[in-house]
Image (cartoon, coloured by chain):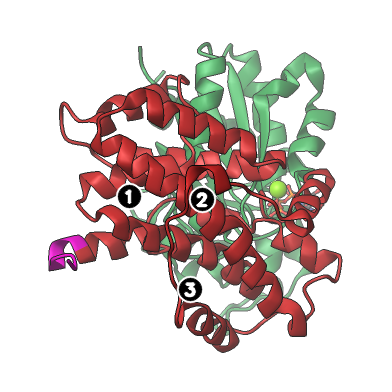
Chain colours: A green, B red
Amino acid sequence: MPRTVRIGIGGPIGCGKTELIEKLVPKLTALGYKVGILSNDVYSKEDARRMAVRLGEKVIDKDLIVGIETGLCPHTAVRDDPSMNVNAADQLEKEHPELDLILIESGGDNVTLTFSPRLADFFIYMIDVASGDKTIRKGGLGILKADLLIVNKIDLAPYVATTIPDSTTKTANLDLMREDAEKMRPDKPTIFLSLKEETGIDEVVDIIREKALFR
Amino acid sequence: MSPVPEEMLNLIRISDTFFPLGSYTVSQGMEQLVTDNLAAKDRIYDIISVYLEKIWKSFDLQIFFFALQAARNNDIDALLELDRFCFASKIAEESRISTQKTGFNLANAMEFREHTVGISYKQMIKTGKAPGMYPIVLALVARELNVNEQGGLSLIYVNLIEVVASLVRLAEIDYLYAQEIMSDQITGIDLPVKQFPDLHQSCPIVDIASMRHEKNTHRMFIS
Ligand SMILES: Nc1nc2c(ncn2[C@@H]2O[C@H](COP(=O)(O)OP(=O)(O)OP(=O)(O)O)[C@@H](O)[C@H]2O)c(=O)[nH]1
Ligand SMILES: [Mg+2]
């Protein structure tokens, strides 16, 4: 029996990781996939509770949402010593062998974040436009290595100034960000979207199906 | 007899914070002591001495020594009895569970040779037939890696690091002061073997802190 596919989602605090899961789960469920969630929170199990409330029992059983406290080292918890998460994922899989995939939200952390290959089969790194359009060109393991890079909150681009000196626009320059993504990760997909306006989410679902679930 | 380099390095390896025990998620009640203002800077030394004398040296270490003996005798029943005794003696649930998780992680990261008590016991832990508390698993590992009694050093060190590092991570003390504490606790340390009837674990300040911590919804450490 194949192991449940584990998808890691990492990125800085507030980039929209939990929001992404909240938008993905109903779509994946509608396609017939059984989804479990592990949520790493640096402080409290707030995100796990929030998802249980917002997704509701109709979409996902609350037993399938597990909160994990990581002890101030969110990157350690998913990379250097992911034992806590691996154990929790194993446990979830044991109790729910019907699961097709487990989404693992890392605690909000830095741009060098990656997932241990023992923990995640597929790694999504997420940033948002409002924290500066320079982020992709700055690089970092998350940007370079992720199987999928998501640039969220494009709806906010008109409201923030560009941080790239040679930008011809005054506000955040999405075209330059696309060029940067092309240069930094030529063979890997990058999706620009707005979870708020619900654009681009189907593309994410397609990539997950094609490159992580293979079906 | 001191260990040869290979054994020495293995002893360091299993004690190092890079070794995947999940220690960085554990504060052993220290987070709550800090929250409750019971770990003011002038009391930190006293509190860490309490952990050292009343919990690690008098209890966990003794369990380790007994388990090592049981492992030498290939006595699975004795190991299981010690394991259950250790489990039952950790009064606060979260300290019980975190000691068990650490044990599980240690077993998981270790390859035992075929036909050893270690490989059989690891299987029992994985299938839920044994609790797999850290001191018990460490004894099996100490035997596997041929570090034997010296494994007790690892037990003391790992526990000490959990508590001191949590203080640094909570920004209660700075990284150099942490080394001062470590150095002072290590200087002149003795690791006495006690007799079974004396074996006990009682440290109300830590037990109460752990129980309060269990109910705390805003926390960073699992214990
Ligand atoms: N304008 C706008 N806001 C968004 C978008 N996506 C998410 N947000 C908001 O960004 C905030 C943070 O979103 P979360 O999903 O909690 O972010 P997170 O990455 O899970 O945060 P941590 O778990 O704390 O690291 C929330 O207030 C969201 O509503 C978007 O596309 N546009
Ligand atoms: Mg979140």
Q: Which residues are magenta?
A: B1-7
Measure the C-alpha gap from mark 1 to mark 2: 52 Å
| Residue A151 in view (yes/no) | yes
1 vs 2, front mark:
2
- Categorize mark 2 by other alpha carbons within 10 Å: few (<14), some (14-19), many (20+): many
Give the residue displayed 78% in from the left and 27% down from the top: A55
Q: Residue A182: image x %, image y %?
A: 40, 58
Q: Quadrant of residue B110?
A: top left
From what the image shows, is residue B150 above or below residue A201? below
Give the residue displayed 51% in from the left and 79% down from the top: B182
Number of numbered markers? 3
Give the residue displayed 76% in from the left and 49% down from the top: A44
Q: Which mark is residue B60?
A: 2
- Residue at which label 3 appears: A138
Q: Earlier in the sequence, mark 3 or mark 1?
A: 3
Q: Quadrant of the N terminus of chain B?
A: bottom left
Q: Are marks 3 and 2 in contact (CB under 8 Å)?
A: no
Q: Amino acid at mark 3?
A: Lys
- Categorize mark 1 by other alpha carbons within 10 Å: few (<14), some (14-19), many (20+): few
Q: Amino acid at mark 1?
A: Asp
From what the image shows, is residue B81 above or below residue B27? above
- Label 3, secondary structure: give it: helix
Task: Name the residue nearer the viewer: B62 or B180.
Answer: B62
Measure the C-alpha gap from mark 3 to mark 1: 18 Å
- Label 1, secondary structure: give it: loop
Describe residue B103's horizontal placement relative to residue B120 as left or right.
right
Task: Name the residue nearer the viewer: B166 or B147.
Answer: B147
Give the residue displayed 39% in from the left and 31% down from the top: B79
- Residue at which label 1 appears: A187
Q: Residue B123: image x %, image y %?
A: 34, 24
